[in-house]
Image (cartoon, grey):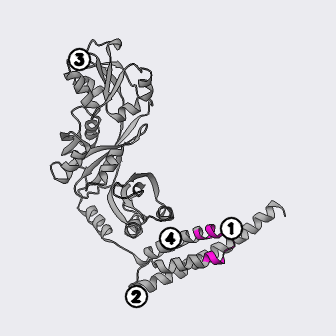
Amino acid sequence: MELSEYRARIDAIDDEMVRLFAERMEVAAGIAAYKKENNLPVLDMRREKEKLLQIAEKTPEGLKDYAVSLYSLIFELSRSCQSRLLGTKSELTEQIETALKETPPLFPGHAVVACQGVEGSYQQLACERLFKLPNIFYFASFGAVFSAIEKGLCQYGVIPVENSTAGSVNAVYDLMMKHNFCIVRSVRLKIDHNLLVKPGTKWEDVKEIYSHEQAISQCAAFLQQHPEIRVVPCENTAVAAKMVADSSRRDIAALSSRECMRLYNLEALAESVQDQGNNHTRFICISKDLEIYPGADRTSLMLTLPHQPGSLYKLLSRFYALGINMNKLESRPMPERNFEFMFYFDLETSVYSPEFRQLMAELPSLCDSFSYLGSYSEVI
């Protein structure tokens, strides 16, 4: 048989499969109407398990796993379609609708904002990109910033979550699991690290370099060229610059910003020493209350899934079925549960789209636990 003949047979089979798929979804719509009339839930787990067993028994050996995977996806699509037809809502969708109505039309220009570190930090620069005139309070740790928001000491907090070179800030993702907050905006900031010293200090004088561990990671190639110099992590790049400025020692340097160079009256022995010229860090702006400002087109979620095969696949298939793009998937181990993980998602979807509303109505039923972190826009 020629290739063209095989393809003709495939086309004919596909035509029949499309017809049968449409017919199946039409029957599913009838089931949805019946469930609505009789106040029945969309998901019938027992029925699905029985159906998958029947399908596996009817499928030839060697194809059973493929058939089960195919029908698992079909079941997901069917449930999604039924939920849409039923107009399923949840407590979360009602909270989102309330936030959309009650959030002011403009993002505030002036606010009390919590940042980690000291004056001159990249978080301060990110904060000033987000707010026209922020009143910044500095805290010693990321955890203290989250606590300041929870306790109402500050209206907003600005926290780094990922860098284009060094990756995710794992400590922040771990803190996300412990605190209650909402993301209201994000911003990407160009990061430019410089080797800062006291005026008059020469290269041969430098014995130690201080900076935050993320900055150290972002400047790894530069630091490897100077193995004779000891590298010391500290709380923040701005803290490192202030330490150099305040110290009586002349043999220490800091990897920090030009802003800190000007602020603390330092000099740059070397400029732009990060490994990648296109080095950006993404910061999130968090608040205690759910606020969704106009134009929100990104949504962040944290959730746990049933500890069983296919649970993550089923969730991802729901995103796919609704045509929702996923920008980020991060997993972090849960200390209190052996070999179980919290999953963090960034989704690209307008908060006004029907697909978003449907997903928010369906997600809680797909997860063991679920946290909606907010919908927002990003400043670039």
The secondary element bearing badge 1 is classed as loop
**Disc 1 marks which residue?**
62
Residue depicted at x 22% and y 26%: 242
Residue assigned mark 2? 38
Mark 2 neighbour density, 10 Å: few (under 14) some (14–19) many (20 or more): few
Q: Dominant secondary structure of the magenta stretch?
A: helix
Q: Quadrant of residue 98?
A: bottom left
Label of residue 76 in the image:
4
Q: Could you say whether the residue bearing mark 2 is in a helix, strand or loop?
A: loop
Q: Is residue 250 above or below residue 164?
A: above
* Mark closest to the chain's N terminus, 4 or 2: 2
* Residue 247 sits in quarter: top left
- Mark 1 residue crowding within 10 angstroms, few (<14) / some (14–19) / many (20+): few
Amino acid beneath label 2:
Asn
Query: Mark 4 falls on what kind of element?
Result: helix
Residue 255, can we see it?
no
Label 4 to label 3, Cα distance in Å?
A: 64 Å
Amino acid carrying label 3: it is: Arg
Q: Amino acid at mark 4?
A: Glu
Magenta residues span: 55-68
Percent of width and height locating residue 287: 24, 52
Between residues 81 and 309, which one lies in front from this camera angle? Answer: 309
Q: Nearer the viewer, mark 4 or mark 3?
A: 3
